[in-house]
Amino acid sequence: MNENQETRFLFLSQLLRRGVRDSEGNFIGRIHDLSALVGEIYPIIHTVLIRCGRLRRYFLVAQWKDVSIPNQPNLTEVALKVPRSSLVPTPVPLDNEFFLRKELLDNQIVDTRGRKVIRVNDVSLMLTNDEMRVVHVDVGMRGFFRSLGWGRLVDWIVKFFFPRARYFTRDHFISWKFVQPVSVGSLKRGLLKLSVTIKKISRLHPADLAEIMQDLDSNQRSALFQSFDLETAAGTLGESGPKLQRSLLETVGAEKAAHILEEMPRDKAADLLADLPEEEASEILTKMDQKKAREVSELLSYAEDSAGGLMTTEFISTAGDILVKDMMEKMRGELSTAETIHYIFVIGEGGILRGVITLKNLLLARPEQRIDEIMSEEPVSIHPEETVTRMIELFTKYKLHTLPVVDSEGRIKGIVTMDDIIAFAYGKKEST
Amino acid sequence: MGPGIITANVDNDAGGITTYSIAGARTGYSLLWTLIPITISLIVIQEMTARMAVVTGKGLADLIRERFGIRVTFYVIVLLLLANLGNIFAEFSGIRASTEILGISPYITVPLAALFVWWLVVKGRYKSVEKVFLTACLFYFSYIVSGILARPRWDEVASHLLSPSLSLNRDSLIITIGLIGTTIAPWMQFYQQAATAEKGVKIKNYSYSQIDTVIGGILVCVVASFIIITCGATLYPKGIHISSAEEAALALKPLAGEYCSILFAVGLLNASLFAASILPLSTAYSTCEAFGWESGVNKKFSSAPTFYILYTSLIIVGAAGSLIPSMPLIQVMYLSQVVNGILLPVILYYMLSLINNREIMGEYVNSGAFNLIVWITIISTVILTILTIVAPYI
């Protein structure tokens, strides 16, 4: 058992191109690449790829456990604990194996903490006894110069002119915990690897995901999008512009697209379908769950800038004769899908809107009161065909936040919220 | 308008017009034949960039960085920056030369032009002006008309077009490199690939990109040949060697008589402004793409500082350089294209390496014929460069 628990940090740029000697002192070649296994928090280095030969180049692979790195500041050579004869030519890579130089260094990754796409200039490795792990990627200027081979020269120059420069302390490292690789060499293998690491990126806000998708190229985008679970895919789609939406949907079939759309709020799904060519839209609709497809179709029948076009059908409603205390229980069930919980709409027979209660009033009421005792009757509402201008008038006049959309018979069809109007107005402004 | 056609029109920039004019004026029709292999090369090379863009979805700088690492990328980008700076220099020299013909002080027009170009791109108004630029490219028809009006001996033209001959004197060699460099400029590969990747062209629609590229190439060939023919018919017999833009304008005399200078000036101004709006931008984009810096005219300065600084500096240096009082404008416009030609083999070498890599391109790797054409281009350019250096000593 090796008692010597020394831990050292190395950079990939310090290891690449270094010479390799075997256990008998023969020079074999130069380090071309390292492979690591994903799946743990910090991937563990698995093999070293050695480039041999001068005129006819070929590769040999050494297991990491057979490699020993001398403890010198200027690394020139690396030694193997085995003779050359025990090295093998490159095997087929494992499913969860990735290559640092080929797939990580100089490639793009998603920084899930900074929420952007960024290029890797160097990789920081932690060496402890027999194991080496990938701990950080270096995306900063120092890594840039170090990889160029000018690390020390630039350090010296900067130190000469600006001794206290933040250049030295502000190393721009991103911990592997926040790194989402997106480089897809061959798509099939890429997808496998992505699904192992995808959890990190799925936790980002959909708006950030949509922006990140914009910064990736089409292959990376399609690989990443295909690895998302339905919920993440739906969220991302909802926050993307029409062009991005179309390009993302093209990477999954109509079947999967239908399932993704089922996870989206109905109004967003309707907006998305409205921007697609008719045959594509109908194909997706037919593959969707019937009830949801019907709701979406109904929304599609309204003009884009009318109340009907902007409304959503996910709101909390109740009959008037329920008691306040029973209402709380009921709400819990509907909370997860409702667009807004601030207003609860009270519906009578045939879906006719009778009144509205604010959440505040509900909480202030006594548990034994009936809903229709505390509601505000005849709330302000708007017809599905009404325009955005009219909606803004009503919002401002009555200082509302949510407006129920009611048809000519008084039946509530959906709600329009303030942020829908803002998003719409902003969208119009951007396109002019 | 596809990226191919736009690239082709910008290809005929200040440097282009000057180099083709000089070729015609100093060597007559004898270098006309080079345009055929050059155009074939051009179409092949630009098709390669479009193909790489469609298959990988990435720009050229991107691919070079990912495949060859940071060192190679650094040196390639430095070369590109130098070549493009020369080209931008040439564009502003073109602006200065054309406004001097029109009698306006360049100290007013050049800064104004720089400001205009900068504002145009940064404020995102480029697209609306692009149509104006493209329409004004109709100017090149005046070379066609003038060429016909000058009544060249068409049998002479045809025979020179079809029979290669290369004299080993230094001037001819340099002009030939310039012809290659101005027609197949390195910035074109970076620009067309980035523009095509940005458009998100799908593989199934790829044939449109191909047609776009071919049309662009033919356009370049036609315009270039007519400039050479016209100058060969009007200037060469009179021994006018083009040491100033005024002399270059005389080529249009058959068409425009006394107004030839004005016609030429307007055309040159348009070509220079057009190119000046594209080149600095493309250079800044390629550099940031390669080094992973934020870029984009839709980003605020604080989010993409290096991009804006680079872009602005390129314009300022180019404009300021052209204003140096005794700057030999024609020489600048002409020699910058020679630099393009010298740097071209480097870029082509890396492009070949990328496009023949099955891992990157899948089934869309280069055919043997294409590889051959590119290798011939590389070798010819290198040999020409070497010959130019040793020619005085032979």
Image (cartoon, rainbow, N blue to C red):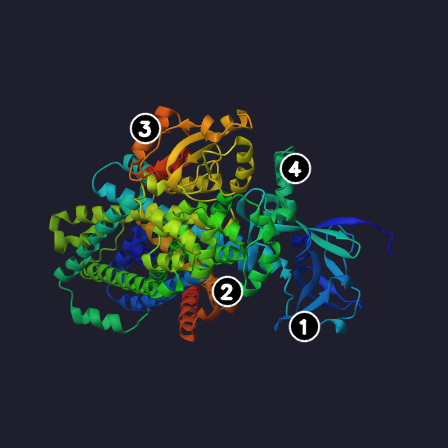
Residue position for label 3: A393
- Above or below: residue B32 compared with residue A372: below
* Residue B42 shows up from this direction: no
Q: Same chain for marks 2 and 1?
A: no
- Marks 4 and 3, how far apart in space? 55 Å
- Marks 1 and 4, how far apart in space? 42 Å
Q: In this view, does A6 lie to the left or right of B336?
A: right
Q: In this view, does A250 lie to the left or right of B112?
A: right
Q: Is mark 2 on a helix, strand or loop?
A: helix
Check disc 4: other Cα within 10 Å, few if <14, some if 14-19, many if 20+. few
Q: Quadrant of residue B372?
A: bottom left
Q: What element carries label 4?
A: helix
Q: Is mark 3 on a helix, strand or loop?
A: helix
Q: In this view, does A260 lie to the left or right of B258?
A: right
Q: In this view, does A217 lie to the left or right of A84?
A: left
Task: Identify which residue, A311 or B165, lies in the foreground.
Answer: A311
Of marks 1 and 4, the one in the foreground: 1
Check disc 3: other Cα within 10 Å, few if <14, some if 14-19, many if 20+. few
